Image (cartoon, rainbow, N blue to C red):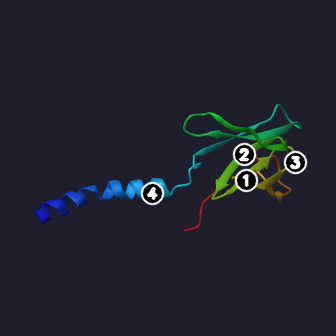
Amino acid sequence: MKTTLTSNLRAFYPFLIAAAALWAMPKNARAQLYVTESTGPGVIGVVGEYDATTGAAINASFITGLRDPFGLAVLGNTLFVANFSSGTVGKYDATTGAAISPSFITGLNFPVGLAVKSAK
């Protein structure tokens, strides 16, 4: 009887671990999708924040006042935005949208794409 009970409990370990992980996860955790919008060269644009699962807008004006935002990359809690017309890459807080360093990289010729490789 004891062996059967122990075996049954071991079968539920993965479920218990998953339940504990879900319980410990922040209640507002969600996968975010960041989208750049600009109406043309030299025009002020925005970065919007959307739910990556449903597509629902979380904050369509997450970061405003950007000059032609084109490329985006996320590393941890940092969002990098390439500004096409100003030739810069800005660094922003991916949770709040607050500017960390709007001119993190300067002197670029029309930056469009960004990618991040995390250090291991």
At 82% across and 31% down in the image, what residue appears?
39
Which of the numbered marks, if any, corresponds to residue 80? 1
Q: CA distance from mark 3 to mark 1?
A: 14 Å
User: Is disc 4 in contact with disc 1, using a CB cutoff of under 8 Å?
Assistant: no
Pick the quarter of the image with the N terminus.
bottom left
Seen from the viewer's position, the closer of residues 106 and 73 is 73
* Amino acid type for the residue under numbered disc 4: Ala
Q: Is residue 113 left or right of residue 53?
A: right
At 28% across and 56% down in the image, what residue appears?
12
Q: Quadrant of residue 53?
A: top right
Q: Earlier in the sequence, mark 3 or mark 1?
A: 1
Which of the numbered marks, if any, corresponds to residue 86? 3
Q: CA distance from mark 4 to mark 1?
A: 29 Å
**Number of marks drawn:** 4
Which of the numbered marks, if any, corresponds to residue 21? 4
Which of the numbered marks, if any, corresponds to residue 71? 2
Seen from the viewer's position, the closer of residues 2 and 68 is 2
- The vertical placement of 119 against 77, above or below, is below
- The vertical placement of 103 against 46, above or below, is below
